[in-house]
Image: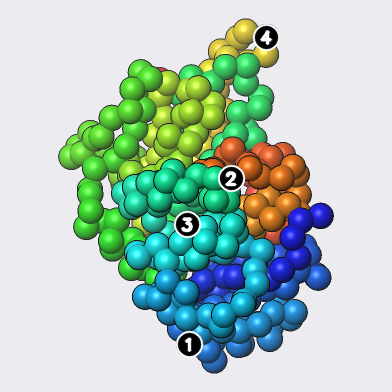
């Protein structure tokens, strides 16, 4: 059993933060939580809903986050973009594990540098993957069928009405302003691609095809380096989801295509969709909650100080079990050809 002080969730009243709090409460009823936000009323509503939680206001422009002196926590979760890195500094000054998810591939350099400069302070989990690493970990679970993985192609589809709250929308806009190029691995080398070379046709679970773009996301190096695949790409599309098309709420899905060699030495190709009928929020919250569980020692071995990623900490089989519990499903698809 790990530390039992309160987990401080910065942005805890937002979609990702509130969803994470709900999961942690379900899994660990006795774990104290601190829901931190700019609006105390909203934070208090989330705290009241999950129980065994305290609501506080937070000021990311202050190195002490505006929190009372002597506050004790077991970890700091930045469920929003901490542009000044005061949340990370606060955690490192107190030797606390830290998790971030809003930096994206284009914004992680300052976090990585500060994390490297103070590598011995505490564990730091970079979870700025799509849905906080859930898709990458799911790909690793599917890759267990292979003796050797040569290629992994992921295509994620987000409903146009499911782009998240104000913080999530701001993240998408910021990443789009920084670069329109995508990162891929081709023949073992990481490359930036743009223009027509980055265009992808994404086949959805209901048979429709949407135009998608290769994007710069941590899942690309995460999957590539964890599996050894020499060809890896991650494409992203926004449009009308299958759930909303059927008259329900916005759903979310990711297609995961793998190619390589099976246990018998024969060529093997598999294709699956990971689908959740309630959109991106449950998947992102799950990714964060899985990371927090590991960081504070509630599951698995103690995490050593330094920089970590979800695929290096989270057991894929356990993640698949938790995915099923929250209503996510894997659906087999026709394997890719050519």
The image quarter in which residue 49 lies: bottom right
- SS under mark 2: loop
Which comes sooner in the sequence, label 2 or label 1?
Answer: 1
Q: Name the residue: 60% across, 59% down.
A: 96
Q: Which residue is mark 2?
A: 305
In space, the residues marked 3 and 4 are separated at their CA atoms by 39 Å
Q: Earlier in the sequence, mark 4 or mark 2?
A: 4
- Give the left or right position of residue 25, taking residue 19 as reference: right
Mark 2 crowd level (few <14, some 14–19, many ≥20, 10 Å Cα): some
Question: Which-is-in-front pick, marks 2 and 1?
Answer: 2
Residue found at the very far bottom of the displayed protein: 41
Residue ID for mark 4: 264
Image position, residue 247 (x, y; %): 52, 69
89 left or right, relative to 4: left
- Of 253 and 95, the residue lying toward us: 95
Q: Taking 191 as reference, is 37 left or right?
A: right
Badge nearest the viewer, 4 or 1: 1
Give the CA separation, mark 3 to mark 2.
18 Å
Residue 101 disc label: 3
Mark 1 burial class by Cα count in 10 Å: few <14, some 14-19, many 20+? some
Residue 7 position in % (x across, y down) = 65, 68
Q: Where the C terminus falls, by quadrant?
A: top left
Q: Earlier in the sequence, mark 4 or mark 1?
A: 1
Q: From the viewer's perspective, is residue 319 above or below residue 30?
A: above
The crowding category of the residue bearing disc 3, from other C-alpha atoms within 10 Å (few below 14, some 14 to 19, many at least 20), is many
């Amino acid at each position: 059993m790990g530390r039992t002080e309160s987990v401080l969730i910065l942005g805890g009243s937002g979609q990702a933060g509130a969803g994470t709090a709900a999961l942690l409460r379900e899994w660990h009823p006795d774990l104290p939580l601190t829901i931190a936000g700019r609006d105390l009323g909203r934070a208090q509503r989330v705290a009241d809903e999950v129980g065994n939680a305290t609501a506080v206001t937070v000021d990311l422009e202050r190195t002490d986050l505006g929190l009372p002196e002597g506050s004790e926590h077991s970890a700091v979760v930045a469920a929003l973009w901490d542009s000044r890195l005061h949340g990370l500094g606060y955690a490192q000054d107190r030797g606390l594990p830290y998790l971030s998810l809003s930096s994206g591939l284009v914004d992680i350099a300052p976090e990585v540098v500060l994390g490297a400069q103070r590598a011995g302070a505490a564990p730091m989990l970079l979870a700025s993957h799509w849905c906080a690493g859930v898709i990458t970990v799911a790909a690793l679970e599917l890759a267990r069928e292979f003796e050797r993985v040569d290629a992994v192609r992921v295509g994620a589809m987000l409903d146009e009405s499911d782009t998240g709250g104000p913080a999530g929308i701001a993240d998408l806009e910021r990443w789009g302003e920084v670069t329109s190029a995508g990162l891929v691995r081709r023949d073992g080398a990481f490359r930036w691609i743009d223009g027509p070379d980055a265009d992808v046709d994404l086949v959805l679970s209901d048979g429709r095809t949407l135009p998608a773009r290769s994007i710069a996301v941590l899942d690309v190096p995460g999957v590539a380096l964890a599996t050894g695949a020499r060809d890896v790409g991650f494409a992203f599309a926004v449009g009308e989801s299958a759930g909303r098309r059927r008259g329900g709420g916005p759903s979310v899905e990711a297609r995961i295509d793998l190619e390589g060699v099976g246990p018998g030495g024969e060529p093997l190709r598999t294709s699956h969709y990971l689908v959740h009928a309630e959109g991106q929020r449950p998947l992102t919250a799950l990714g964060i909650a899985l990371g927090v569980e590991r960081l504070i020692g509630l599951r698995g071995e103690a995490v050593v100080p330094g920089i970590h990623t979800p695929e290096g900490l989270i057991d894929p089989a356990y993640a698949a079990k938790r995915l099923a519990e929250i209503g996510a499903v894997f659906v087999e698809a026709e394997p890719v050809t050519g």
